Image (spheres, helix red, strand yellow):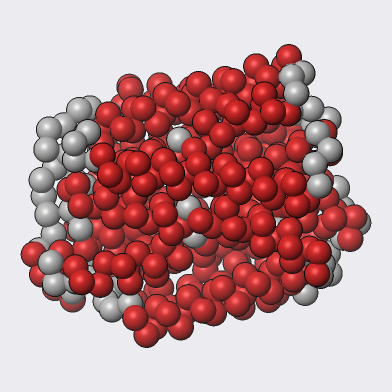
Amino acid sequence: MSTTAVPATATTRRTPGTLRYALILGGLSAFAPLSIDMYLPALPRMADDLHSSAPTLQLTLTAFIIGLALGQLIAGPLSDSLGRRRPLLAGLVLYAVASVLCAVSPTAELLIAGRSVQALGAAAGMVIARACVRDLFAGTAMTKFFSMLMLVSGLAPILAPVIGGQVLRLTSWRGVFVVLAVFGAVLLVAAALAMPETLPAERRRPARIGSTLRGYGVLLRDRSFVGYALSAGLMFAGLFAYISASSFVLQDVYGLSPQEYSLVFGANGLGIVIAGQVNGRIVGRVRERTLLTVGLSASAVGGAGVLAAALAGLPLGVLLAPLLVMVSSIGLVMPNASSLALAEHPHNAGAASALLGVMQFVVGGLATPLVSIGGEASAVPMGVVMAAFAVVALLVFATLTRQRTR
């Protein structure tokens, strides 16, 4: 990993506000898990209420993932040109308004459209959060901060389904989107009041289509960047296979209630948090590449275990153990993959962050229709997709990335 660092004023001047940055940037990073996980327990009810099928409702997830990818491609370069604050605040406004539109959608088709717009706003928050980290930190400090973000954003998949399940006890699925609108509004106020500009004017790049495309070309020709980003994206695909299918598999096939499903989902989220914090404590003593190798290997083993349990028709408890291993490995993969991918590109961190996110969510979006093809009557389709993407992620990492010394 390169030793290239951002200017000292960008790394030392703001050190006293590290906790504040972690809370705000962690909240921005939590947009995806909150926006996805909170309404998962409601999917079966939504299908009935909107007179739609399960595959159609799963398109609300696909639309959100595609919107995240496109939004990051736009917001990343814009933040390199205009600074981080203005695109961030605009995205937060868009997210809050679109969440309200989702809450009042009368049909599945309009809900899918609303989710696409909601994703554009969420994308700005997520891509700019990663770019801000690159503005503020370098080297091992950047990896440690990404691990700290896992503590904040990692709480989202723990709390989101639990909150979603409790909201469903008080109101309909529409209340979930009202809660998301409030979350967006709170983050908008917090960012406006407490998040300063992290990209000085002298480090900004002109907003021209040609230079933006050339910047993306440079990134795509960087074999190691593509390797780290693509392996993380394939890892995300396995995770999204679990996210999109687990609501139906665990509730319809294994008979869990929405509240029980929320607890299982939350336990897996806790695994992400624990793995992320272990990563933050040992990185520096153990190289990022080594930790990333461990995380991807654990994911492959866990995915294979889920598939084996599903094929053998084993009890739910046996399936949940390898599922926990696979999901928890995200806490090792994401901080290290993000840090290694962004390390060589401090001067176009927004564009690099955008491509990193795009590869995660575009590749991740492929998992949802693949799982849907296999039907909802068994855990086997979920296991097949999870195992396949996890194994391919490990192979891509080993093939495309090259070892670097600090």
Pick the quarter of the image with the C terminus: top left
Q: Residue at x 77, y 74 (%)?
A: 104
Pick the quarter of the image with the N terminus: top left
Q: Residue 47, how many percent across, how many down? A: 85, 53
Q: Residue at x 40, y 78 (%)?
A: 191
Q: Which of the 4 quarters of the picture holds residue 240?
A: top right
Q: Does the rendering let one see residue 199?
A: yes
Q: Nearer the viewer, residue 71 or 244?
A: 244
Q: Residue at x 66, y 62 (%)?
A: 163
> Residue 227 vs residue 190: left or right?
left
Placement of 326 over or under 395, stated as above or below: below
Q: Residue 36, how many percent across, how many down? A: 62, 55
Q: Nearer the viewer, residue 152 or 368?
A: 152
> Residue 121 vs residue 147: left or right?
right
Q: Nearer the viewer, residue 41 or 402?
A: 41
* Residue farthest top in this picture: 312
Q: Does the rendering let one see residue 38?
A: no
Number of marks in the rendered image:
0
Q: Which of the 4 quarters of the picture holds residue 76?
A: bottom left
Q: Residue 232, how many percent across, how many down? A: 42, 38
Q: Residue 18, how many percent across, how many down? A: 26, 67
Q: Residue at x 49, y 38 (%)?
A: 328
